[in-house]
Amino acid sequence: MDGGLNLGPRELLTLGTVVSGLAVTWGMVRQQLKAAEEKFSSMTKELHEIQTRLDQIDGLTGRHEDKLKQHAIISSVSSLDKRSRFEADVSARVKNLEKLADSNLKLHNGEHKATAVKEK
């Protein structure tokens, strides 16, 4: 033997089988990688859509939260107390003005008394 690689038909057949098996396996791996890439792409799109919807919901939630805070301030005990005191003060002033108007009407009774000023 001259130290070279002696391959008989059996070894060549085995080598061919192994190489063809590797080629088939490589094809299957490429196909699975392509399918995984497509699935990843579709999941990325879905995730983007979900994120957009969540942003819209967060915006609505924030606005509703602000409105609830405003209603809480308006309906707070101190605010209601201030409003109640203001309304009571206005009501008392209106009643006082009504009394003054009634006494003014009773005083004149629709007619004015004669004054010292002569009409020309």
Image: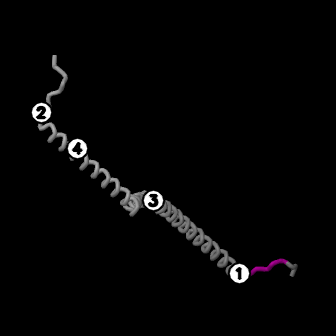
Query: In this view of the protein, which residue sits in the foreground, 1 or 60?
Result: 60
Percent coordinates x, y for residue 33 in the rendering = 58, 68
Q: Amino acid at mark 4?
A: Leu
**Whether residue 23 is visible:** yes
Query: In the visual, does 22 lie left or right of 79?
Result: right
Query: In the visual, does 51 lie left or right of 108?
Result: right
Q: Looking at the image, tell me whether mark 3 or mark 4 is earlier in sequence order.
A: 3
Q: CA distance from mark 1 to mark 2?
A: 141 Å
Q: Quadrant of the N terminus?
A: bottom right
Percent coordinates x, y for residue 13 in the rendering = 67, 80
Q: Looking at the image, tell me whether mark 2 or mark 3 is earlier in sequence order.
A: 3
Q: Nearer the viewer, mark 4 or mark 1?
A: 4
Q: Looking at the image, tell me whether mark 1 or mark 3 is earlier in sequence order.
A: 1
Q: Amino acid at mark 1?
A: Pro
Residue position marked by numbered label 3 in the rendering: 62
Q: How is the image coloured?
A: one colour
| Most common secondary structure along the magenta stretch | loop
Q: Is residue 109 above or below residue 59?
A: above
Residue position marked by numbered label 4 in the rendering: 100
Residue occupying image coordinates x 28% and y 52%: 92
Is the Cβ of the residue at disc 4 closer than 8 Å to that at disc 2?
no
Q: Nearer the viewer, mark 1 or mark 2?
A: 2
Q: CA distance from mark 3 to mark 4?
A: 52 Å
Residue occupying image coordinates x 18% and y 24%: 116
Percent coordinates x, y for residue 88 in the rendering = 30, 55
Residue position marked by numbered label 1 in the rendering: 9
Q: Looking at the image, tell me whether mark 4 or mark 2 is earlier in sequence order.
A: 4
Q: Is residue 39 magenta?
A: no
Identify the image quadrant of residue 113.
top left
Residue position marked by numbered label 2 in the rendering: 111
Local secondary structure at mark 4: helix
